[in-house]
């Protein structure tokens, strides 16, 4: 099973790991794509005003320019610990036991706009780049889409896609049995369902934490639904909106 998480705009400072080495991240065949982006982002950071325009940063986020400038020398920490925000606060990776973190190492991938798919325990620095950032001379969708989609298509097991739609566009999961995009919904007293915004991230974090703590051996989406039901989550499998789209899982929060 492969669980895909979106990143967060907010990240912790510091770290105890050595400086960035893109060849050590998950899917080392993406190293060339990563190197090109790191080079472009650090070069852009030499011009703070241009960086703030490209990344649409206000004055209070000027510190993000220095983060990008120092990408190659900055200390690193595991990706699952680097990101903060609603989803990662609910996941609360720092309180997971070693068995859960070990399970995360080969199960959870975070989709970074800068590094592509990174493993939960891959060592990364703090940075600023979003799925909709506009770098001079480069479109992130064109840069990542084919390469990441190919890596996901090569995965033979279950894919649980918890990414936002913006990140899913940077590398779609395959449209096949065993791959599903998760939508978080609320259900009213009449059974009507509606999409959630803020609380969707919290639900995804709680769901991921439960997976890591339970460490189920899931070989199909049906088995995932059965596990979720037994664990107290309402999870429903639905066909994709079209033949070339992945199936969808509705997680009722």
Image (spheres, rainbow, N blue to C red):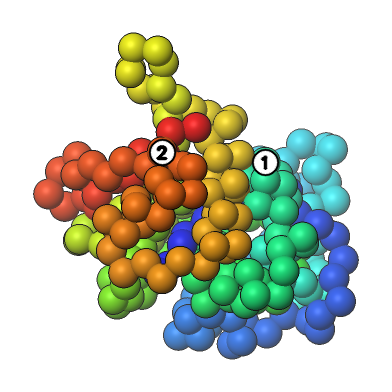
Q: Nearer the viewer, residue 41 or 24?
A: 24
Residue at (37, 67) in percent of width and height: 218
| Residue identifier under label 1 | 86
Front tag of 2 and 1: 2
Residue at (45, 66) in percent of width and height: 216
Would residue 33 be found to the left or right of residue 237 on screen? right
Would residue 73 be found to the left or right of residue 43 on screen? right
Q: Quadrant of residue 21?
A: bottom right
The x and y percentages for residue 189 are: 40, 13
Residue at (85, 60) in percent of width and height: 13
Q: Is residue 234 above or below residue 133?
A: above
| Residue identifier under label 2 | 234
The x and y percentages for residue 73 are: 82, 78
Q: Secondary structure at mark 2?
A: strand
Would residue 117 be found to the left or right of residue 243 on screen? right
Would residue 38 be found to the left or right of residue 60 on screen? left
State the quadrant of the N terminus. Answer: bottom left
Q: Nearer the viewer, residue 245 or 187?
A: 187
Asked if marks 2 and 1 touch (Cβ < 8 Å), the reply is: no
The x and y percentages for residue 41 are: 66, 64
């Amino acid at each position: 099973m492969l669980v895909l998480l979106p990143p967060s705009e907010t990240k912790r400072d510091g770290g105890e790991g050595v400086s960035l080495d893109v060849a050590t991240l998950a899917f080392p065949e993406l190293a060339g794509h990563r190197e090109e982006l790191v080079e472009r982002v650090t070069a852009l950071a030499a011009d703070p005003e241009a960086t703030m325009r490209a990344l649409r940063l206000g004055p209070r986020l000027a510190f993000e320019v220095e983060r990008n400038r120092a990408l190659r020398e900055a200390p690193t920490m595991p990706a699952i610990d680097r990101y903060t925000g609603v989803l990662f606060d609910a996941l609360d990776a720092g309180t997971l036991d070693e068995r859960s973190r070990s399970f995360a190492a080969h199960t959870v991938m975070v989709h970074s706009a800068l590094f592509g798919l990174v493993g939960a325990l891959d060592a990364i620095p703090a940075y600023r780049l979003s799925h909709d950032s506009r770098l001079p001379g480069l479109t992130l969708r064109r840069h990542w889409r084919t390469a990441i989609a190919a890596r996901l298509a090569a995965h033979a097991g279950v894919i649980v896609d918890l990414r936002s739609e913006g990140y899913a566009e940077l590398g779609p999961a395959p449209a096949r049995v065993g791959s599903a995009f998760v939508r978080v919904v609320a259900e009213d007293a009449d059974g009507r369902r509606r999409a959630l915004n803020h609380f969707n991230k919290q639900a995804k974090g709680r769901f991921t934490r439960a997976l890591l703590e339970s460490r189920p051996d899931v070989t199909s989406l049906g088995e995932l639904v059965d596990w979720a039901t037994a664990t107290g989550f309402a999870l429903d499998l639905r066909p994709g909106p079209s033949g070339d789209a992945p199936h969808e899982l509705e997680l009722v929060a």
